[in-house]
Amino acid sequence: MKTIYFILALIFLVFISCQKESTERLLDSDVKFVPTDVIIKTKGFYTIDKVFEFINSFDHKVESITYGFYTSTLPIDSLKYVLDYLKLKPYTHNGERGYATGYVTNEIIIFPKLFNMENKGFQADWLHSMEVLKLAEKTDMEVSGNTIFFHVPIGKEKEWVEKFKKFDFVEWAELNYIFQVNPWP
């Protein structure tokens, strides 16, 4: 029985003696990140047509644009129609995930995910789809805006983060950090 208490006490001491590193300290050090990945968040007032102009001003692949928030003035029983319509678009999913989601309150609300949007044909089709589905962006909420997942030249990730941060419509820009998750406290 003493052995069990000793082992438990030893385990307890190991846990309380572990040093916790703050996120700030980790970010200041030379933390690993996914090569080529830079993620930015635009401010709410910066609409999707302007996002397209922005991404077209660079020669970067755009893996995805997410977290846009749209409402439709179609009748509220049209949610399935809207989601089915978007499911047919090659840029609203990646074949496995990413399908638009939505719900109904007093209006239809959807959350599309847009893939490979450096493609100008996809951009034009999305803007046309917004007209067909009577979609309007919600730009006046605290969470409004789009998250853009760029692929920049390898070795230039930190440089691009700093470049993106200089735009007044960019809320934040970050590397795609790799953190080791430790399930123990």
Image (tube, helix red, strand yellow):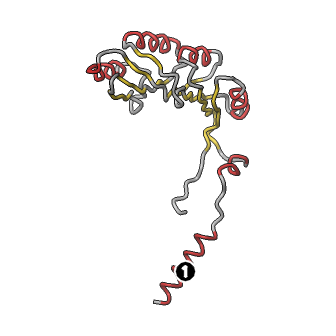
x and y percentages locating residue 108 in the rendered image: 35, 22
157 w.r.t. 114: above or below: below
* Left-right relation of 55 to 7: right
Q: Which residue appears at 64% of the width and 36% of the height?
A: 174
| Outermost residue, left side | 77
Mark 1 surroundings within 10 Å by alpha-carbon count, few (fewer than 14), some (14 through 19), many (20 or more): few
x and y percentages locating residue 165 in the rendered image: 69, 29
- Residue 178 makes an appearance in the image: yes
x and y percentages locating residue 109 in the rendered image: 38, 25
Quarter where residue 168 is shown: top right
Which of 61 and 174 lies nearest the eye of the viewer?
174
Q: Secondary structure at mark 1?
A: helix
45 w.r.t. 97: above or below: above
Which part of the image, by quadrant, shows the N terminus? bottom left
x and y percentages locating residue 82 in the rendered image: 33, 19
Which of 147 and 142 lies nearest the eye of the viewer?
142
Quarter where residue 105 is shown: top left
Q: Which residue appears at 66% of the width and 57% of the height?
A: 21
Amino acid at the residue labelled 1: Ala
Q: Which residue is mark 1?
A: 9
Q: Which residue appears at 32% of the width and 15% of the height?
A: 74
Which of 109 and 20 lies nearest the eye of the viewer?
109
Which part of the image, by quadrant, shows the C terminus? bottom right
- Residue 64 makes an appearance in the image: no
* Left-right relation of 100 to 180: left
